[in-house]
Amino acid sequence: MRSRFSLLLLVMAGLVVAFAPLPVQPIAHQERTFRVEAHQFAYSPSELKVNPGDRVTIRLVSMDVVHGLYIDGYGISVEADPGQTATITFVADKPGSFRFRCNVTCGAMHPFMIGKFTVGTNNWLYRSMGFVLLAVVGITAQIKQKS
Amino acid sequence: MAKVELTSNPFIKRTLKSRWPQLAVFIVMLAGYLFAIVAGLVGTPVGSRNFSIVFVWIAWWAILILVAVPFFGRGWCAVCPIPLPGEWLQRGAVLTPPDKKPKWLNRRWPKAFRNIWLQNISFLLLALFSSVLLTTPSITGIVLAAMFFAAIGLSAVFERRAFCRYLCPVGGFIGLYSQTAPIELRIKDKQVCAACEGKPCYNGSIDGYGCPWDVFPGGLTKNSYCGLCMECLRTCPHDNIAVNVRPFSADLAKPSARMDEAFKAFIMLGSAMIYAGVLLGPWSALKDAAYNVGTNAWFIYVALFLAIIFVVMPALFALCVARFEKFTLFKKRFATLSTALIPLGLMFWVAFSLSFVLTNASYILASLSDPLGLGWNLFGTANAIWQPMLTSILAPGQSLALVGGLIWSARTAQKAANEAQTLSIPVIVYCFIATVVMLWLLV
């Protein structure tokens, strides 16, 4: 009976972790412009943070060979020739953390030329950590019950 | 879940006993392997356009870590082409045993090295150069060729598959993680093996070769060192060998207390975390350090890599499991409890590989049509555009793998702790911290 109750409690806690809305502070949408320098095999800056709903402009400047910038999840990209600047503008309407990466083969380490684009809070990370914590608490409780 | 004997099905048994299906797969694999060497050495230096990089580090790696190891354990070893030419030379035959064996040195592998320390070292050697290896076709070609010729050389000097068993950098971790796989080769009845004269499964007979992996099947209790080559199925005169489907991680219920295997678990767990940070993270200084071999930054990277794997992670684990007791008892408990890191490490690699593979899988189409990067268009897909696949399910998939890995590890820790007569909670906390770090790196 007790173990069933514990299981039910865990399942309910799991549902809360998975679906409970996280607190969001209302922030006015802004125009955000980033100058991102690309060189073999890195972006500078390599981490961009914006708020959900912001209108984002990325000016990609290639410092050596042709580079691109593709944002996972958004599926948008831009390419810049050596010494040139290319611009992309979009609305950051998908919250979360996304990798951005070079989409033009630029040399050996090209597949690992990666940056991070975060829109608001990275809910997946926090919910996953919640699950991890819940799993540990559940298993520890089960061990205590057995002993 | 009870075991289900696959070999009770006559068709499966006949197929596994016959040498022809295996030979057919071997030949395809061998051709692919040799072509990967050639492509690496003479093809385009652009990794994402070269067969050796795309098919070895994207296609093969995806199949190996996402399918073959979790579901078939050492299934890859059963069709791996690397030991083939050496084995054919050693045996003096391609299929059934010949009347007269060729006179190679046929030495026993030195006793001091009958463990997986050399495999730990060979894996680390590749790991430390991995940024270059994964991206430079010529280096991949050289490494593939080196493994190929090392296997031939060792077959000429030592008996059986010395390279696979004691040196292969890939075989070491496949063996470790094969313990979690839901498939096994085992004997049916111990008494039959005890009474069997001549032990043809180990020594060979006219029906087949003695175990190439230097294992007596009668003593098999875990998958780690069984290469699923099926020789014992062919040689057993008593029909006492079975291939079974079983619950996942059945071998981990009886944990090993060997330090070489314990450190393999740390090496694999630590490498997955380091790769997640270096290769998939946004920190360019780390990438530069890992790629620029021979520079001061690279030496610092190597020192940090080795320190994390051999000092930081084992020391933190030791702190979790330490008690005031004799060192030998501590060592045994340390090794036994480290079994919990095996499912965690496997799922870390799954999570890491999902990102790497889904992002780069679209290179396979282009490389298929133009494997050497010479401007061919064999199947009309040479100009296929790079496009990351399934990025919307990547983060949920990685989270699922990591959370699942933690739960799996915690269950394993409980069993290992019962075996070691100690508490599992410190080990679970260790796994929890490692999982949180990996989540932060990947998601």
Image (cartoon, rainbow, N blue to C red):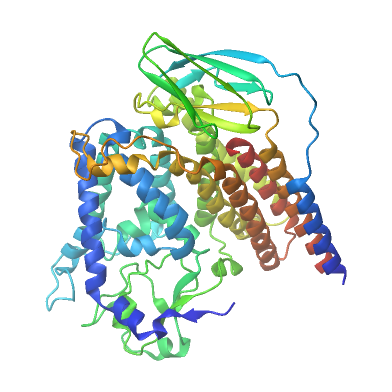
Picture layout, residue B297 above or below residue B242:
above
Q: Residue B169: x and y, percent?
A: 38, 50
Identify the residue shown where x is 79% and y is 44%.
Answer: A20
- Of residue B255 and residue A104, the one placed in the foreground of this image is A104
Any part of residue A78 in sight: yes
Judge from the rendering whether residue B376 lies leftward or rightward of residue A55; answer left or right.
left
Left or right: where does residue A136 sit relative to residue B101?
right
Query: Which quadrant, please, contains the N terminus of chain B?
Result: bottom right
Residue B200 in view, yes or no: no
Where is residue B309? Give x, y as percent: 54, 41
Q: Residue B282: x, y in percent?
A: 54, 27
Seen as rendered, the residue at the extreme top is A83
Image quadrant where residue A66 sits = top left
Q: Nearer the viewer, residue A127 or B124?
A: A127
Residue B125 lies in quadrant: top left
Residue at point 39%, 84% (across, down): B9
Is B96 or B13 nearer to us in this picture?
B13
Total labels drawn: 0
Vertical relation: B267 (above or below) B408? above
Residue at horizontal 58%, vertical 46%? B398
Instruction: Work out which quarter of the rendered image holds the C terminus of chain B and state it.
Output: top right
**Residue drawn at (57%, 57%), measured in percent from left and top?**
B343
Image coordinates for residue B365, horizontal then vertical, percent: 31, 43
* B201 is higher (above) or lower (below) than B289: below
Taking the image as shown, residue A111 lies to the left or right of residue A32, namely left
Q: Is residue A39 above or below residue B344?
A: above
> Residue B386, located in which quarter of the rendered image?
top left
In the image, B364 versus B380, the foreground residue is B380
